[in-house]
Image: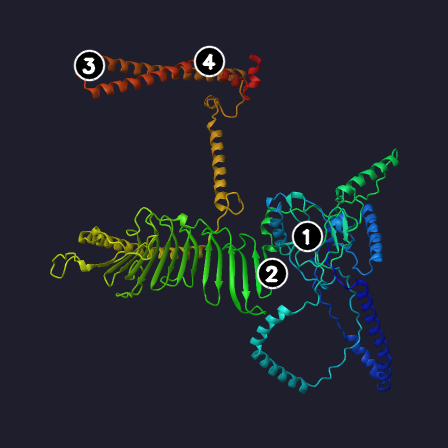
Amino acid sequence: MEVLKEKVEEEEAAEREEAAERAERREKAMWPMEVQKEESTVTQEMLRDLERKLSEIEVSIPEKPSTFTNDPIDVSKLPLSYQSNTLKEEHLLQVADNFSRQYSHLCPDRVPLFLHPLNECKVPKFVSTTIRPTLMPYPELYNWDTCAQFVSDFLSMVPLPDPLKPAVQEEEKAPPKKYAIRPPRDLSSRFEQEQEMKRQKAIQAEEEQRLRQEEERLMEEESAKTDPLHGLRVHSWVLVLAGKREVPESFFIDPFTARSYGKDDDHFLGIESLWNHKNYWVNMQDCWNCCKDLVFDLGDPVKWEYMLLDTSKPLLSLTEGDDSEMSEMNDEDDVENLGKEDEDESFDMPPAWVERIEISPEAFETRCPNGKKVIQYKRAKLEKWAPYVNTNGLVSRLTSYEDLECTKILEVKEWFQNREDMLELRHVNKITGLIIDSFKPGHSQALRVHSYTSMQPERDRVMEFYETARVDGLIKREETAKTMTEYYQGRPDFLSYRHVDFGPRVKKTALNSAESNPRPVVKITERFLRNPEKPADEDVAERVFMILDERIQLRYHCREDHITASKREFLRRTEVDSKGNKIIMTPDMCISFEVEPTEHTKKLLYQYEAMMKLKDEEKLSRHQAWESELEVLEILKLREEEEAAHALTISIYDTKRNEKSKEYREAMERVMHEEHLRQMEAQLDYLAPFLAQLPPGEKLTRWQAVRLKDECLSDFKQRLIDKANLIQARFEKETQELQKKQQWYQENQVTLTPEDEDLYLSYCSQAMFRIRILEQRLNRHKELAPLKYLALEEKLYKDPRLVEILKVFV
């Protein structure tokens, strides 16, 4: 699909040819004048000397810089379809040329169509044959968004040499001639050059003074500046038509950014042509209103002119009236063409000449070329890496700059993957020095966000947590050098806020920390949510422990029908005075304001019990504040260890990177191999003890073979008998012991205690179990012994060492 452009390629070529002819005529007109001047002033000897010197001079004409560079490709290794065209492809190119000529004749004001560019081997190929639909084994490529993201990561954008026309491979230029015209002498004055340098330095100094004003003015000019090439650039987009795969409406995809745009977007000023692997369509609609009014019904030949007559092309959608008329016309045509054979005038598209797309798992994971990609934007730079390329798990970095030259960094954003510490994003503000780390769920300390300027303790920082992963319901902790604020959610005591003020340390040590030398707590403020099970006058909304002033302030929740809340303040004094006498609760130790006072709240006993309870809660709050300080130190220490290690998680299915899984698999294979060797060794040779009696290396005779067989069978028979006798002896022993135990029970039955009877019954049960097992083993041995004997006899007859000798006895 090509975007509209105004200049015609033929006009540009004609202008270049005219400019070259004019330059050639000027050179030819200047040559005779120079020659006449030299002949009039120089002698023959000087002329020969000049020719000799000119022959030694070689002037290399610098090549034209080209922004469109091609990677070196070995053409000889490419398939034959890349290097030549088949007869069908040649026919298609002729059809395309004919179509292009008709199009240029009918639409002379429009840009020539992009039909058959040159491929790597400089062979013209029709654009539709460059597309080969391929099904890939990666689920990420089944959806347009993930597929477009993969393509955008894999592609590297290279600006066109001419933004007004597609890239065309230039032919190789002939090498420069050995003899060339000597360049003209430099007649400029050095004094003037020095003066010019001084003037440039003065101008540069003035420009440095106006730099700030220029940057401010640039912002205004960029917003109001008009693009001279607006609407003339050539760019290709991907159009997804509505209909299939539940696509509700048509939209465009930018292959370089993987962003999607609707057909009504202002980025699209017009469409020249569309193509896929089946056909090529030319837009015949007016694009005065960009692409907003375009109808993407490719079956309408009035709006979209197709190049190939394809029988499978979508039909034009008709109304009911038109549908009935069309059906009548079809019936008449069927009657007229009855008995005639239909001639297929469609041209079958040749198969794609490109090879199938093959993406290895390594290349799919690498995505970017060589695992890294850098995209330069205006005042920004985006860097991308493949997973596991960086040892710290960095996959993307976005750097924002203050100036257009990209020298002053404003902020840096870094994205991570596969980190064991679950670090996902790091945002660094270079101006303020603020660092914000964002974590995915699963951190050992349930961290979600960590904002800090320094990893040193007792500095300004903010920690946010996943409250569902914590028992105490902490969701946020803000810390400064003198304060600590915590926010809670979902606690059974309805605590939602705690603010701790610290004072200066009295004892100063070389290393101050919450563990060795904690900061003294000056004030603790706690806030609670409404507890519906308590009355509002008894449900504390805020309590303040003023430790230095020895006061405790309480503020209760306000009733729904009141505008003020009850308050109470306790003067917390020591329980004993300086003489050791116990202090008694007095009315002046509790100052209260109650909206609706009651009798029991005025009693000193109630106030005393409330103050004692508050003292215990004050100790608990101070302890929790100390534990929070220790937790901050633990988290900072853990974060330093994680940053130093920056270990990455590797899937157990990743056999290439997972060293532990690889070592475990190799160890298991080694163990299985050793077990197999042991099993092979365990299968001892049943003839080995008998063959050892014979001289080594001597060939067996018939008499020796028969004797070996008989001895082996008799030995095996004796072992079977011995095993049966052993089982029978154990059976008889267990039976005799059981009979003795029964006789003992009959003799002492009267004098036995319940514990002795329980022991006797337990022994009888176990003995009967052993006797039944021995009986079963003996019966089974009697059944299997003859079968084992016959199996050994058959094995002996089939033994390769005895088979040739014993087969006469079979």
Location of the C terminus (image quadrant)? top right
- Location of residue 586 by image quarter: bottom left
Image coordinates of residue 183 in percent, x first then y, are 77, 77
Among the two numbered marks 1 and 3 on one chain, the one whose residue lies closer to the N terminus: 1
Query: In the depicted view, which residue is nearer to us: 592 or 104?
Result: 592
Residue at x-position 46% and y-position 57%: 437
Position of 281 relative to 719 (above/below) = below
The numbered dot on residue 375 is: 2
Mark 3, Cα crowd under 10 Å, few <14 / some 14-19 / many 20+, is few
- Location of residue 74 by image quarter: bottom right
Secondary structure state at the residue bearing disc 2: strand
Mark 4, Cα crowd under 10 Å, few <14 / some 14-19 / many 20+, is few
The numbered dot on residue 238 is: 1
Label 2 near label 4: C-beta < 8 Å? no
Q: Which residue is mark 4?
A: 786
The colour scheme of the drawn protein is rainbow
